Image (cartoon, helix red, strand yellow):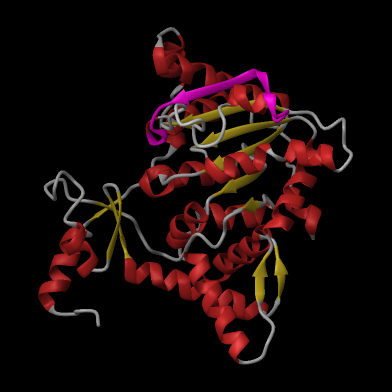
Amino acid sequence: MTDHSPERSNRKAELLANVVEHIDMKSFDARPIIEAMEKMSFSSRDLGRAAKIYNMMLEDECAVFLVLAGSTSAGGCMDVYADMVKNNMVDAVVATGASIVDMDFFEGLGFKHYQAPLDEAGGNGDDNELRDLYIDRIYDTFIDEEELQAVDHTIYEIAEQIGEGVLSSRAFIKEMGKYLVEHGKKEHSLVRIAYEKDVPIFCPAFSDSSAGFGLVKHQVERIKAGKGYVAIDSVADFRELTMIKIEAGASGLLMVGGGVPKNFVQDTVVCAEILGYDDCEMHKYAIQITVADTRDGACSSSTLKEASSWGKVSTTYEQMVFAEASTVIPLLASDAWHREHWKGRKERRFGKMFD
């Protein structure tokens, strides 16, 4: 049973006092610092080239896939991703369930992420105490678990409204966007804006998030009642994303982190070939921002040069940036925003392919 004593409530309020404020890429002009970094070495030079490649994607009018793994949305980059979709700088999103459900949809419902107090064990806090207070920790960022459980129940409600059927994660996330339009507390949500702009969002491991808890509850109750239920089809995700790649032609990847979303979007080229589309070109542009290592044979899925051996990514315009993404993405996105190649880009509205 959860302790609701005044002492507990006061301590919890003390730890959840500082809201994470998401950076606005439009509020500053990163072009001068990006241009200066291009003339440096190490990761600064890599970032300068990555920014140039991203601007090439926008100028070339190829399809741009934003690929998200990790926790930069919770850490302060959430508004950057929403702005990129809102301003036609991204045509499709492939992400972890946590990035979409536990972070963006969570804030779309009116909840917040919080900075851990700096005096709490170097900014991280006592995890045993956090558990007692129902506070979840992502490094130095806190989430109210009781609020996160409200997300679980909201996903359950959405599934109940659908009733039954086999959906791709894209189709279910579209329903989440519709829910935010009708009931959300934050207009500047990636899920909501993507719904309004027909920008599809895919989460190939959708149940690995608060969506999983809500969907399991939905299925268990429907099975007990002898009714059909909603199920998420990851094969449909792969098929739909491959259809987008085939339709898009030239494409570019802006990848934050790696893992399943990164490999999933890269594999669309191979899948297209398996389907007989021998003329489906490799992803023309690719950027990965990561702190993952290559020595375990992975780098959170293959390095971009290695991916070329699989027929996934061209090595002409590819750049690895080994840096913590929340320090890099605001600069890269601000630079692209102020260079304005996104202006006049045609809206792909790939989501309409599946209506």
**Residue 315 part of the magenta segment:** yes
**Quadrant hosting residue 84:** top right
Residue shown at 44% from the left, 45% from the top: 70
Front residue of this view, candidates 298 and 29: 298
**Residue 230 part of the magenta segment:** no
Residue shown at 47% from the left, 27% from the top: 294
Asked if one can make out residue 211 in the rendered structure from this viewpoint, the answer is: yes
Q: From the top left corner, tell me how far across and down residue 288 is, in percent.
A: 53, 30
Residue shown at 60% from the left, 75% from the top: 159
| Quadrant of the frame with the N terminus | bottom left
Residue shown at 87% from the left, 32% from the top: 278
Q: From the top left corner, tell me how far across and down residue 150 is, in percent.
A: 42, 73
Asked if one can make out residue 86 in the rendered structure from this viewpoint, the answer is: no
Front residue of this view, candidates 228 and 247: 228
Q: From the top left corner, tell me how far across and down residue 34 is, in percent.
A: 45, 18
- Please state if 120 lies on the left or on the right of 72 as rendered: left
Magenta span covers which residues? 309-326
**Quadrant hosting residue 27:** top left
Front residue of this view, candidates 337 and 16: 16
Q: Is residue 273 above or below residue 104?
A: above
